[in-house]
Amino acid sequence: MRDLDGRAVDALALAPGELAALVFVDPGCPLSNRLAPEIARLARELAGRPVRLALVYCDAELDAPAVRAHLSTFGLPDGALLDPEHALAARLGATVTPEALLVGAGGAVLYRGLVDDRAQEVGADRPAVTRRYLREAIEAALAGRTPEPSRTVAVGCFLRDLPGGGG
């Protein structure tokens, strides 16, 4: 994978006690875009804490300028990663956007699924968020607890050109 400046990045190379919160997104997925305010809030809350939040873009047709434009349009945090060959998606088993994963030491997936519970299925949203699953998982992990739930079913757009499956 590469960052937006073209540098090779290992998103799972973590310092002791550090976590990686990865959210797979796609500018063409309305559900990804609707999560922008929550992701921006979460990024602000995590400032100075041992959690690396990164948005992961898997569409091979997206380049750095297109991703930068998406980040700017939706007020999303810097630190995006390009995964056009789906290396990270395949390694972690991500299949849709938006899909969140919280990863700890040794690449252990501590949480996988929804960022929050607004979207119950494609086209059916709750009027208000009642659970912020990714935020709750991060707080639990930072406190040394196992996130509960550790898995929810992500709802969204299938990753395009995913080997062995999605879109």
Image (spheres, rainbow, N blue to C red):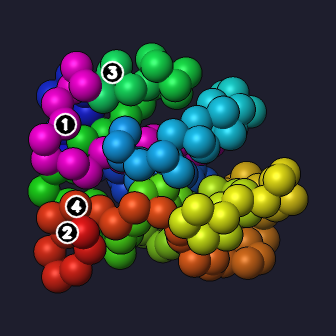
Name the mark on residue 162: 2
The mark that comes first in sequence, 4 or 3, is 3
Residue where numbered disc 3 is placed: 68
Between residues 73 and 4, which one lies in front from this camera angle?
73
The mark that comes first in sequence, 4 or 1, is 1
Q: Residue at the spot x=57%, y=77% of the render?
A: 153
The type of residue carrying mark 4 is Arg
Distance CA(mark 3)–CA(mark 2): 23 Å
Position of 9 relative to 133 (above/below): above
Location of the C terminus (image quadrant)? bottom left
The mark that comes first in sequence, 3 or 2, is 3
* Picture coordinates of residue 93, whole percent (x, y): 35, 75
Distance CA(mark 1)–CA(mark 2): 15 Å
User: Are the residues at dot 3 and dot 1 in contact (C-beta closer than 8 Å)?
Assistant: no
Q: Residue at the spot x=13%, y=56% of the render?
A: 85
Distance CA(mark 4)–CA(mark 3): 20 Å
* Picture coordinates of residue 127, whole percent (x, y): 83, 53
User: Are the residues at dot 4 and dot 2 in contact (C-beta closer than 8 Å)?
Assistant: yes
Residue where numbered disc 1 is placed: 62
**Which residue ends up furthest to the bottom in the rendered image?**
164
Q: Is residue 91 magenta?
A: no
Distance CA(mark 3)–CA(mark 1): 10 Å
